[in-house]
Amino acid sequence: MLREMLALRNAGVLWRIGSVKPGFQTTVPGIEGPLLVNAPPAIAPVGATGARDVSAVLIPVENTWRKNLYVNVLAALAAPEVRRVYAVNEPSGLEQIVGLERLKLVGFMRPPELVEFMATVAAVLNVTLVECQPMTKLEAAAAGTPCLTGVLGLPGLEDHPFTRLTETEWTDRPDLIADSISRIAGLWRSAPGELEAMAADWCDLLRRRCLSSYEEFLEV
């Protein structure tokens, strides 16, 4: 794909090629900065009051090595606040080493249905081994729900409290990811309005970063 895109640029069909992966221009010559920033979808958050089960989490990742499904499931099961773990895909074989009584498979959901489901849980788990700007996180945040990921390295967002709450460098440590889940669950119980405001502010900042990145990239 990259070879074909670069050939089209060299032929004058494409003007510039950008990336949503921080630092990708240092990996593939011909990719140009600045980083293109994705925006959350424009939806109204459901809110925590009455509709949200703060003892439940959703894991919408595939059962492939880079999506890290097993670590996400183990982390959810290790968090004492979590009573229900919803997963889109089955962590096949995991029942041989840990009980999966709290795990319920919900299967594939289309985007509108998935976002609605995200708004009913305490957190979405998407701690993967390879990531750029996961749409899962953007959709969850737009629904007012924290989504745990690895470190994304998005410039201008590193110090935001929502970033610090939802990013972890420990992609292979279920126990430490479980600590992050517990922090989120604690905020839902002690300060749900603060958490919702934090997610909304992060989304607003990301939308502004998205517009400015495209303006810079397109030299508007």
Image (spheres, rainbow, N blue to C red):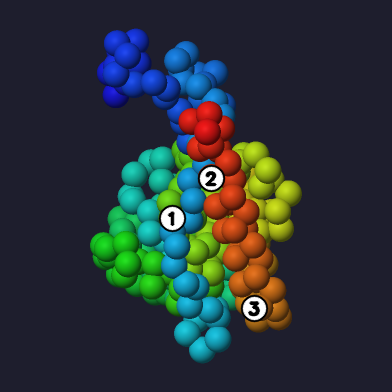
The answer to whether any part of residue 39 appears in the image is yes
Instruction: Name the foreground residue: 136 vs 211.
Output: 211
Type of residue at label 3? Pro
Q: In percent of the image, x 42 and y 24: which residue is there?
A: 17
Asked if residue 192 is positioned above or below residue 216 in the image, the reply reads: below
Q: Nearer the viewer, mark 2 or mark 1?
A: 2
Disc 1 on helix, strand or loop?
Answer: helix
Residue 209: which quarter of the image? top right
In the picture, the quarter occupied by the N terminus is: top left
In the image, 193 versus 68, the foreground residue is 193
How far apart are labels 2 and 1 at the CA level? 17 Å
Identity, as a three-letter code, of the amino acid under mark 2 = Cys
- 10 Å crowding of disc 3: few (<14), some (14-19), many (20+): some
Q: Is residue 79 above or below residue 129?
A: below
Which of discs 3 and 2 lies nearer the camera? The answer is 2
The disc label shown at residue 192, or none: 3
Q: Which mark is residue 97?
A: none
Identify which residue is drawn at 45% across, 15% down: 30
Label 2 Cα crowd, 10 Å radius (few <14 / some 14-19 / many 20+): some
**Residue 210, which numbered label?**
2
